[in-house]
Each structure stands twice: as structure tokens, then as C-alpha cells.
Image (tube, rainbow, N blue to C red):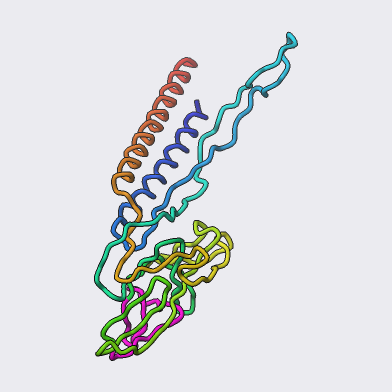
Amino acid sequence: MIRSLWTAASGMNAQQMTVDVISNNLANSNTTGFKKSRANFQDLMYQTQLIAGATTPGGGQIPSGIQVGMGTKPSSVQKIFTQGDYVQTGNDLDMAIEGRGFFRVLNGDEELYTRAGNFSLDSEGFLTTPAGARLQPEISLPAETVLVTVQSNGQLTAHGAGDTVLLTEQINLYTFVNPAGLFAVGQNLLRQTEGSGDAIEGIPGTDGVGTISNSFLEMSNVSVVEEMVAMIVGQRAYEANSKTVQTADSMLGIANSVKR
């Protein structure tokens, strides 16, 4: 009965984490380039009372044995990098990636990565994220720029009056062997880790890095309906584990009363 209390408590903790992750997903359902997360769990150790295959006193063999689980624990919170929906914005500085790639930006002195292509200009004309991280390699648009076009292969062209070409630059994308291993630092930015592997640079449209769509943004890949259903499931599982705690406590109370 004491074991049941702790097993159920581990289940309650697990479902609490599930709801926490879902809450963050829902909070970012309208965040540009956001990738939803999923809580993963694994079972705890087992108390073995009888080993499968053991020989009985009569010479037979136990087919399945007896093992009682001790509960569950979180194993990871995994980012899911499925494609989000595209929204046409009409803003010539907006870019959406169709494929596996990431933009590289410089935040202070640290190179980070993002899927959010809602860029704007800083006071020096550099393309930056809303948080002020500059797109890499740095691109500074001339003050005379009236239109920016970005081809699917990442070629950026700044046009002046009369459709004169003021500047041509190349925007490359970066992929990872294991993007789920990237470390989220907030502000739509991700940090490379040993788990993600090194960033692999590629020209858009080659090597599976994806292509760039100009004047579009990739929205969050969160499905509000799916998250609400998952939240209900998590809530009910939490309630069921809570009921198990109450039942185990009641049984323990009955056992104690027998002693009296």
C-alpha cells in the first residue's frame, strides 16, 4: 500500500509535467516559428517477486513471472520540428523556411539559430530579429533601398528607385543531424549542443536544407485542438492517480485499524 502511494505520486508528477508542457505550447500557439514540445516518460525500476522461467517445485516452468512496477518519471521534453502553416504578410523583410533549415543569427557574441524569419532593420540598416540579433552573415541595406526581394535559393537583392540594384547578398541556411537536441534559450532562439551536432551550412534549395519564401512567415506548429485534447487526457490521468492515492490511503487506514 505504501508502494502504491509513491507509484501514484510519480504518476501525478508526470501528468503535471505534461500539463506544464501543453500550457507552454498553447501560450505560443501564435508565436512565429515556434515548435511545440512533447513530454516523454519512462517506467521506473520493478520489484521482482518471481522470475519468468523459474522452475516450480513440481518441475514445471513459470511462464511470465511477477514484476511490479514502481511508477514513471520524465525521460525528455522533446521539440517537434514539423512544418508550421505559412502566412503571407506582404512585408518584403519577412522570410519563411520550407524545409529543415534554420537561420543563423548573432546575439551578442553568440551564434544562435531560429526558424522565425520576421526580420526588421536596426538603426544601421542590418537585418535583425525582433530581439535585436543580427542575421548572419550580416546584411546592411543601403538607405536608398525601396524594395527587398529574396529568391528561393537565398539570394537577397536590394532595389532602389527605378528598380536599380543596390546590393546583392546570399542568405544560407543551417541544418542539424538532431534538431531535437538544440537548447532553447527563449526569444525564438536555439543554441547548438553536443546532442544536436554541429550546424551544417547549405545554400537554400540544395542538400535538403529547404528553400526561402519571401514575404511569408512560418507560424507555430501548435494545433490548439490537439493540445486541448491532450490537456484533458493529462487532467483525467492526474485525477485517476489522485484517486489511487486516496484508495491506497484508505486501505492503509483499514490495515492500521485491524491492529487496534
Q: How many marks?
A: 0
The reply to whether the magenta stretch includes residue 252 is no
The quadrant holding residue 240 is top left
Say which quarter of the image contains residue 128: bottom left
Give me the residue at 49% from left, 42% from top.
41
Magenta region, main secondary structure: loop
Closer to us: 191 or 152: 152
Instruction: Name above or below for residue 90 compared with residue 138.
Output: above
Residue at image coords 43%, 76%: 171
Lateral position of residue 115 relative to residue 73, left or right: left
Nearest to the observer: residue 124 or residue 143: 143
Q: Position of residue 84 (x, y in %)?
A: 35, 57
The answer to whether 226 appears left or right of 7 in the picture is left
Q: Where is residue 258 in the image (x, y as percent from the top left)?
A: 47, 15
Which residues are drawn in magenta?
A: 120-144
* Residue 157 drawn above or below residue 242: below
